[in-house]
Image (cartoon, coloured by chain):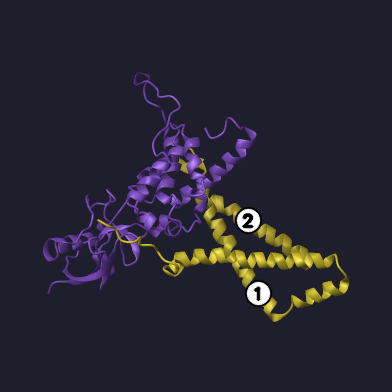
Amino acid sequence: MSKSSRQALGARWWLMRRSYFLVFLRELTSIFIASYLVILLLLLAKVGGDAGSYESFRESLTFPGMLVFGVITLAFTLFHSITFINLIPRGMAIWRGEERVHPALIAGPGYVGLVVVVAIVLVAILR
Amino acid sequence: MANTVVLEVFRYDPDTQVARMQDFEVEYQDDWVVLDALNHIKDQIDGSLSHRWSCRMGVCGSCGMVVNGYPKLTCSAFIRDYLPGPIRVEPLANFEVERDLIVDFDMFLEKLQKVTPWLVRDEERPIEDGEHIQTPAQLAQYKQYTFCINCMLCYSACPVVSHEPDFLGPAALALGHRYNLDSRDQGKGLRLDEMLSSDGIWDCTFVGACSDVCPKHVDPAGAIQQAKVSGTMEYFKSFLMPTGSRK
């Protein structure tokens, strides 16, 4: 007796349900974040070069396309950060006797850390 | 007037190797689940329909199928939740189909064996020495993972299983983690060799669909992430204590 071929989910699995799509989106954030890091590295490299080259690179970052890219990257970064912090308690089982520590007590410090880091960066940029 | 609903049922004949969907109009009662409808079809309409079931109370894990695209135990999938229908019933995804709604679990059983899902002791203690004492706190650490009924809904929901056929998969890895957490066990090193392999925990991308569909709230996705943390710590400990880690 022969069996049928394997019933796989297929290449469009990520469109099959909302939870799959959100995971796919979270994986996609890495492309934007990595691209932004490359831009930051290029900017740092320009700092060490001549002033004209640095100013021209900075000017290019104000183009509408770059601003849109920046907004999308910010949205994806926040999405990745929030979903990552929300998932930390699942991978981190901390016990007090027979009771597992409430997830909010594990995710909470993650959010506090995120707010602190963002505040430090904002102060450094805006002052 | 009797209530009726249409079931679109996956049919597969291994002799002709033809797969198709077949519609059945079923008169149902208000408290029926999808499994009742399948049993009605087999008893009253088409005796050739093949499906697997046993306890009818969500304990045996035999009746897992894909109902309207979601892996479900058909004994707990009420028809009233899918009205007005039609209700599409397919075999579990990511498994080979033997006939109609029956899938071949050999793939899972081979993977399960790789994680040594039993208590391993360095030396067996004589029975006269008594049982291995365990506190309620030690039991609590792994108890959740003992609820797995091997229904395979998690394998059906997992896109990694679908695209990486060698991936050990949610249930096997969760059970491996369960024994690693058991204070009576001494086989963690043996198990981690498989769990940390290229087909093990690092293949998991934390989609979480396995936990979403688990009828026993085992949370295999969480277990795998905890195993990643544990495995990473073991990796670093192996540098500090080359001979004493993984115990």
Q: Residue at x 46, y 64 (%)?
A: A20
Chain ID, mark 2: A
Residue B202 horizontal/vertical position (percent): 52, 51
Q: Residue at x 56, y 53 (%)?
A: A107
> CA gap, disc 1 to disc 2?
27 Å
Relative to A96, B98 lies left or right: left
Relative to B174, A54 lies left or right: right
Residue marked by disc 1: A69
Q: Quadrant of the N terminus of chain B?
A: bottom left
Which of the 4 image quarters holds residue B154? Answer: bottom left
Chain letter, colour yellow in render: A
Q: Residue furthest top?
A: B128
Residue B104 horizontal/vertical position (percent): 30, 53
Mark 1 residue element: helix
Sequence-first tag of 1 and 2: 1
| Type of the residue with mark 2 | Val
Q: How many marks?
A: 2
Q: Is residue A108 above or below residue B17?
A: above
Relative to B88, B38 lies left or right: left
Chain letter, colour purple in render: B
Tag of residue A95:
none
Q: Nearer the viewer, residue A63 or B50?
A: B50
- Do we see residue A127 in this rendering? no
Which of the 4 image quarters holds residue A9? Answer: bottom left
Q: Nearer the viewer, residue A29 or A74?
A: A29
Q: Residue furthest bottom?
A: A64
| Type of the residue with mark 1 | Phe
Q: Residues within 10 Å of mark 2 (few under 14, many from 20)?
A: few
Q: Is residue B178 above or below residue A37?
A: above
Residue marked by disc 2: A112
Residue B68 horizontal/vertical position (percent): 32, 67
